[in-house]
Amino acid sequence: MTRTLTTDTFRDQHGDPATWSAADLDTYVVIGEIAPPPPPLYTHREMQAEAEAWEASAAAQQRLADDLARRGHEIAAGIHRRGAQDARQHAQAARLGWPAYEAFLNGW
């Protein structure tokens, strides 16, 4: 079995990049040039659009929660408040790009 050294496996083997030596950093750069990591599943622009959609959802759910609360429907309002909070968390993760969003979705 042949093991392929990628930037991900190098990070796994060497830990926190803040503790790397100059030689480790050089090795990492060379590995990245020889075998660059695959591009993220979604581009930065696509993830920003996703974040905007989640923000719009959060705003709509919050408006509905406020309206329900004014009418005295506290349980339903609470459900929509939690939905708005969840949408804001999705938006925050999406703003950081695909790797962070994927980690958020998978609970990492």
Image: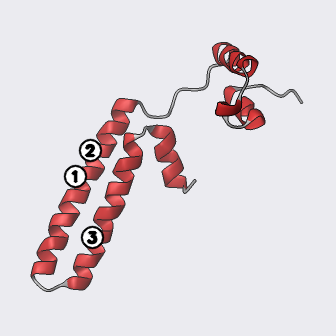
Q: Amino acid at mark 2?
A: Glu
Seen in the picture, residue 45 relative to 54 is either above or below; the reply is above
Q: Which mark is residue 52?
A: 2
Query: Which of the two discs, 3 and 1, sits closer to the camera?
Result: 3
Q: Amino acid at mark 1?
A: Ala
Image coordinates for residue 67, horizontal then vertical, percent: 11, 73
Q: Give yes or no for contact between labels 3 and 1 (Cβ–Cβ under 8 Å).
A: no
Q: Is residue 4 left or right of residue 34?
A: right
Residue, disc 1: 56
Q: Quadrant of the N terminus?
A: top right
SS of the residue at dot 1? helix
Picture residue at 78% right of the left edge, 35% below the top = 13
Q: Amino acid at mark 3?
A: Arg
Disc 3 versus disc 2: distance between alpha carbons? 18 Å
Q: Is residue 4 left or right of residue 37?
A: right
Seen in the picture, residue 64 relative to 105 is either above or below; the reply is below
